[in-house]
Image (tube, rainbow, N blue to C red):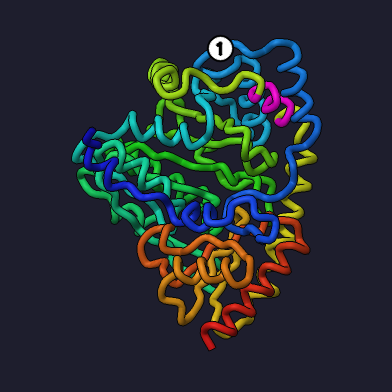
Amino acid sequence: MSIRDRIAAMEQNGITQIAYQRLNDPNVIALWFGEGDVVTPEYIRRAAIDALEAGETFYSHSHGHPALRAAIKTYLDGLYGIDVHLDRVSVPGAAMLGVTLAAQMALSDGDEALVIGPHWPNITMTYRATGANVNEVRQRATDTGWVIDVAEIIAALTPKTRSIFVNSPCNPTGWVMPTDEQAALLEVCRERDIQIIADEVYHRTVYGSEAAPSFLSIARDDDPVVVVNGFSKAWAMTGWRIGWVVAPKSHLVQWMTLSECFNTGATVFAQVGAIAALEQGEGTVHELRDQYARGREIVMNVLGDHPRIDLSPPEGAFYAFPRIRGMTDSYEFASALLAKKDVGVAPGYTFGANNEEHLRICFAQSLDKLEDGLNRLVEFVDETLN
C-alpha cells in the first residue's frame, strides 16, 4: 500500500534515534528526554487511583472534563490576572495533540508555516503533515542567553504564511519572549490573519520570576492565537499525556469536533489527577523549579568555562544547548558518547538547521546523576576532540 509522499518522507527524530538504542538501560545517565526522574507526586497519583476505583472509566466530553476545564481557568486567571472565557479552554489530550489540531485547523497544501528555531523536531513534522511548507528563523547564542528580535520574526513571514510556532520558554535554548515582543507579533498576525501557536508548556520553569510572559495576557477572545500548555513539566506528569489549549472562542465547535476525530477525549482518570495538580500543586511547582535552578547552576559550572564548549545560559525551561567546537556530526558524537561513557544526550541536528555543532542536555535529572553525566561528557570531549 502506498503512503502519502509527505508522510513517507518523515524520519524518526534524532532524540529517539539515540535514546531507543539503550532505552531503560540502568547503566545510562539519561539526559536525552525532556523529563526529570522525580515520580509524579503521591497526591496526584492518589486522585487518579481513587477515580479508577470509583469506576470513572467511561467516555468523557471531547472538550475535556468540565471540572478540569474550570480548574484550568481558575489557575490561569490567578496566575496571569486575567479572566479567560471558559469556552476557550479545551482538553483534547496531550499538549502535542493540541499543537497537531491547531496546525490542522490553520494549514492546507501549499500554505507556509514559520518555526522559530532551534526547535523541538516534532513541530516541523506536524506542520508538514498538513501539506504546508515550513520555514525557519533562528535565534542567536550570546554570552547572556539566546536572543531573537521580533523584527526578524516578522521579516521572515511571507504572503503564504498561515501559522507561526512560538515556543517560550524554548526547548532547547531556554529563550523567553518578552511581553512587548509578543504584543508586536500578535498585532501583525491580527492584521494578516496568521495563526500563532504559542507553546507555553515550560511557563512555570523560568528563572527569576513566577511565570514566563504569556500570550494569554494580551490576546482577545477571538485573536488568532492558540496557547498550548500541559502538566508534563511543571508537575512531573510526562507519562500522563494531559495538556490543554486556550483557543479563539469562536472555534469551540471545531476543537470539540477534531478532538473527537483524533482522540475521542482525554483519559478520564488522568484528568482527575490533573485537577489535583492544579488545586494542590503549587508546592510541587516551586520544588521542581528550585531543583531545575540548581541543575542549571551545575551545568554552567561544569561546562561554562571549557575551552571547546560555548554555552549560553538558559532563561527558562530545563535544557542546555551547548556548542561543541570541533564536533561536526552531532548524531555520531552522541552515539559515541552513549557507547563509551554511558551518557545519553540529544544531537543538535534534530532541532533544525545550523545546529550540527550543538547537543541538548536536559538538566532536570537528580543533581548527583546530572553532575556525573556532565563530567563524563567533558572527559569525552577532551579525549575525542583534543
Image: 152 above or below 236: below
Residue situated in front as seen by the camera: 6 or 114: 6
Numbered range of the magenta stretch: 270-277
Label 1: which secondary element: loop
Q: Is residue 250 visible?
A: no
Q: In the rendered view, does 160 fall on the left or right side of 351? A: left
Q: Position of residue 198 (x, y in %)?
A: 46, 41
Residue situated in front as seen by the camera: 203 or 120: 120
Q: Position of residue 192 (x, y in %)?
A: 27, 39
Say which residue appears at 35% left-offset and 58% top-offset: 137
Pick the quarter of the image with the C terminus: bottom right
Say which residue appears at 43% left-offset and 26% top-offset: 248
Pick the quarter of the image with the N terminus: top left
Q: Is residue 271 visible?
A: yes
Q: Dot 1 corresponds to which residue?
A: 59
Image: 132 above or below 72: below
* Residue 30 picture quarter: bottom right
Q: In the rendered view, does 293 fall on the left or right side of 255? A: right
Tell me if residue 339 is in the magenta stretch.
Answer: no
Q: Position of residue 359 (x, y in %)?
A: 51, 66
Q: Amino acid at mark 1?
A: Tyr
Q: In the rendered view, does 345 fall on the left or right side of 46? A: left
Residue situated in front as seen by the camera: 37 or 286: 37
Q: Position of residue 256 (x, y in %)?
A: 44, 17
- How packed is label 1: few (under 14 Cα within 10 Å), some, or many (20 or more)? few
